[in-house]
Image (cartoon, rainbow, N blue to C red):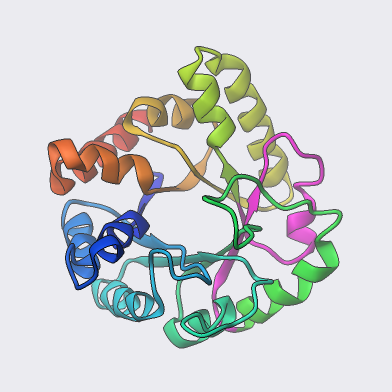
């Protein structure tokens, strides 16, 4: 069954907009896990616009105590700076089950593309090796329409996370079949060389079921923005349970 990892970044965005401790990121994560989520994802950025280093430490402790997966996303090439010790140091101090490498720059509003595995190969290889030495499973963000996804295995990654923004756009425009064929093909190419397949970005209750039925053997979906947005109307517990049901029905 596909695992649901809830990205709690947007909870931190709301908290940071006012200052103080509300809404409580840790409480939100507990609610997600109590409702059936299989893990928690965070994407701390160097500018600390949402999840901050102290959140990472607290959420890692919660995940370890609950025996669920903790997934840290980030740019492996972003240097440390005040308030951001760097992706490797965060992973060293928290021992996440998974580190997901994403090629986002400081000025990006959100992650919007995967790695160019030809161009970035020799920079990625040592970063992946360092994270694997820490005991992290390493996943790398990948575009379904880019050649070379198979190289991620050669570089030492164990999974790829398919960037699903283009699928969500196609679904909204009624062009689902072609998009699913593209993503299914990318998943099969990755799986053929031993890579596990995750997926994330702009997945929602509306489009998730079709994606999981059309793309084979997706191991994990990481969902944040849509889930938190929907929770404003239905509540966090009910929304997470609804996602778990969508996943179960798509199995």
Compared with 227, 156 (above or below) is below
Pinpoint residue 184: horizontal percent, then vertical percent: 62, 30
Pinpoint residue 111: horizontal percent, then vertical percent: 56, 50
> Which range is magenta?
134-160
Q: Quadrant of the C terminus?
A: top left
Pinpoint residue 79: horizontal percent, then vertical percent: 65, 79
The residue shown at (22%, 59%) is 33
The residue shown at (65%, 70%) is 76
Is residue 153 rendered magenta in the image?
A: yes
Q: Is residue 238 left or right of residue 64?
A: left
Q: Residue furthest front?
A: 18
The residue shown at (56%, 68%) is 137
Q: Is residue 21 left or right of residue 37?
A: left
Q: Is residue 196 left or right of residue 52?
A: right
**Quarter of the image where one finds residue 10:** bottom left
Q: Is residue 26 left or right of residue 145?
A: left
Nearer to me, 99 or 158: 99
Q: How many marks?
A: 0
Nearer to me, 53 or 147: 53
Nearer to me, 83 or 117: 83
């Amino acid at each position: 069954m596909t695992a649901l990892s809830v990205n709690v970044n947007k909870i931190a965005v709301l908290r940071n907009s006012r200052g103080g401790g509300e809404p409580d990121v840790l409480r939100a994560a507990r609610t997600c896990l109590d409702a059936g989520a299989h893990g928690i994802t965070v994407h701390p950025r160097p500018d600390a616009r949402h999840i901050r280093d102290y959140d990472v430490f607290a959420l890692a402790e919660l995940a370890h105590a609950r025996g669920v997966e903790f997934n840290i996303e980030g740019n492996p090439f972003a240097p440390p700076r005040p308030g951001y010790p760097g992706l490797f140091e965060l992973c060293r101090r928290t021992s996440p089950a998974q580190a997901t490498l994403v090629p986002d720059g400081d000025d990006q509003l959100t992650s919007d593309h995967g790695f160019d595995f030809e161009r970035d190969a020799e920079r990625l290889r040592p970063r992946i090796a360092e994270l694997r030495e820490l005991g992290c499973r390493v996943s790398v963000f990948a575009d379904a329409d880019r050649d070379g996804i198979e190289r991620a295995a050669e570089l030492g990654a164990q999974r790829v996370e398919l960037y699903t923004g283009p699928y969500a756009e196609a679904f909204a425009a009624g062009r689902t079949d072609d998009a699913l064929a593209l993503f299914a093909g990318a998943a099969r190419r990755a799986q053929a060389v031993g890579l596990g397949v995750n997926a994330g970005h702009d997945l929602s209750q509306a489009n998730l079921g079709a994606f999981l039925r059309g793309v084979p053997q997706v191991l994990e979906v990481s969902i944040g923005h849509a889930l938190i947005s929907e929770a404003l109307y239905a509540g966090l517990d009910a929304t997470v349970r609804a996602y778990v049901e969508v996943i179960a029905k798509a199995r």
